[in-house]
Image: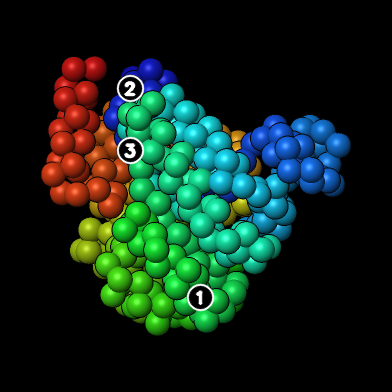
């Protein structure tokens, strides 16, 4: 029997791959534009949604960076975060690790503190009002220089006790992880966890570089790892978590059909895959929608869903005792449901 939507909603789970700027719904885009007196190139929410037809990652990034321009104040960032946490709490998530792209905001003149303070305020409120815990990850934009990433790390200095790690996102092809080896080393020396988008559009060689050149704790996406048998073996041996994003992969044409998505194959190979939403306002669904559509398309079993839920905690940046407690909650839920 196929697991039901109720089973999925009740399953304790974490989201590990979410760009907060990618949770900006068209309605919010208009609301923030109105309160900040910004002109949008769209007349209606429908027109915005109609523009969300992408053939590849860059198509999406162009519109995503443009959308982020409506975020101007700490309050905007706090409201954005809180709206996301409300949705993900309704999806049964108890923990979320969210990326933000500081350079998208500092490059248009906002101080680093605006996004950081706003998001941290939203995270604190979500914990209090919804009981959802969270961690903040700053992501370097890989289409910019390593020098620019160093500047961002410097600006983040006053917040490093409240930022759990760094990531690497934006246009993957032509910007291999090795370009950022020094800034990742410096980030590690400051006690930060490390993750990098790799193998979304880029080749398996980029995943190798993220492992050997950056020494990451987590790989974001990682789909194309399956093209390289030795790489799969290495990822399994390392117990490396892959933060996979099925609806994102469909929308950005990384897969042609959800029924051909590699998630089940990843699990069969012993890879620690997880399900995440990436940029849910742009890709057609939040966390539970990703779980549900993937379950239906691939015929995932209850056991596989339980494994995915456990992976979402073992791959998190929570402390070991917190991870153990969350995994026990998954086991208890599965035993009684
Ligand atoms: N920034 C936001 N979403 C992204 C994705 N899926 N890949 C690379 N950069 C991103
Ligand atoms: Zn991403």
In the image, is residue 292 above or below residue 133?
A: above
| Residue 217 image point, x, y percent | 30, 63
Q: CA distance from mark 3 to mark 1?
A: 29 Å
Q: Residues within 10 Å of mark 3 (few under 14, many from 20)?
A: some
In the image, the residue with mark 3 has its CB under 8 Å from the nearest atom of ligand 2? no
Q: Foreground: 86 or 305? A: 86
Res 234 → quadrant: bottom left
| Residue 24 image point, x, y percent | 62, 41
Q: Is residue 195 visible?
A: no
Between label 3 and label 2, give the one nearer the viewer: 3
Between label 1 and label 2, give the one nearer the viewer: 1
Q: Residues within 10 Å of mark 2 (few under 14, many from 20)?
A: some
Looking at marks 1 and 2 on the same chain, the residue that comes earlier in the sequence is marked by 2
Q: Foreground: 57 or 169? A: 169
Q: Foreground: 215 or 69? A: 69
Residue position for label 2 = 10
Report the coloring of the rendering: rainbow
Quarter of the picture holding the C terminus: top left
Looking at marks 3 and 1 on the same chain, the residue that comes earlier in the sequence is marked by 3
Q: Foreground: 7 or 71? A: 71
Q: CA distance from mark 3 to mark 2?
A: 17 Å
Q: Residue at x 31, y 58 (%)?
A: 161
Dot 3 falls on a residue whose secondary structure is: strand
In the image, is residue 9 above or below residue 99?
A: above
In the image, is residue 87 above or below residue 134?
A: above
Residue position for label 1 = 151
Dot 2 falls on a residue whose secondary structure is: helix
Looking at marks 3 and 2 on the same chain, the residue that comes earlier in the sequence is marked by 2
Relative to 53, 328 lies left or right: left
Q: How many marks?
A: 3
Residue position for label 3 = 133
């Amino acid at each position: 029997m196929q697991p039901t939507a109720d089973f999925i909603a009740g399953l304790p789970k974490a989201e590990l791959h979410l760009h907060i700027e990618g949770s900006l719904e068209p309605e919010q885009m208009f609301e923030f534009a109105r309160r900040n007196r910004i002109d949008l190139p769209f007349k209606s929410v429908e027109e915005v949604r109609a523009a969300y037809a992408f053939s590849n990652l860059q198509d999406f990034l162009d519109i995503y960076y443009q959308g982020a321009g409506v975020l101007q104040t700490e309050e905007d960032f706090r409201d954005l975060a809180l709206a996301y946490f409300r949705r993900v709490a309704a999806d049964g998530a108890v923990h979320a690790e969210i990326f933000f792209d500081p350079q998208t905001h500092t490059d248009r003149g906002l101080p680093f503190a605006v996004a950081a303070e706003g998001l941290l305020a939203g995270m604190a409120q979500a914990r209090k009002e919804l009981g959802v815990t969270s961690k903040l990850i700053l992501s370097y934009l890989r289409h910019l220089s390593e020098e620019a990433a160093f500047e961002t790390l410097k600006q983040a200095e006053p917040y490093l006790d409240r930022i759990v790690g760094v990531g690497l996102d934006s246009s993957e092809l032509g910007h291999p992880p090795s370009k950022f080896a020094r800034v990742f080393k410096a980030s590690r020396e400051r006690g930060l966890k490390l993750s990098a988008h790799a193998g979304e559009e880029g080749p398996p060689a980029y995943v190798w570089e993220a492992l050997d050149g950056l020494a990451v704790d987590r790989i974001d996406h990682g789909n194309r790892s399956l093209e390289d048998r030795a790489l799969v073996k290495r990822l399994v041996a390392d117990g490396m978590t892959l933060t996979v994003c099925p609806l994102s992969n469909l929308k950005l044409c990384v897969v042609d059909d959800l029924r051909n998505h590699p998630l089940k194959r990843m699990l069969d190979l012993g890879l620690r895959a997880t399900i995440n939403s990436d940029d849910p306002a742009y890709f057609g669904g939040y966390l539970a929608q990703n779980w549900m559509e993937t379950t239906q398309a691939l015929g995932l079993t209850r056991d596989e869903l339980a494994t995915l839920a456990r992976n979402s905690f073992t791959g998190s940046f929570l402390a070991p005792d917190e991870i153990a407690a969350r995994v026990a909650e998954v086991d208890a839920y599965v035993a009684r449901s």
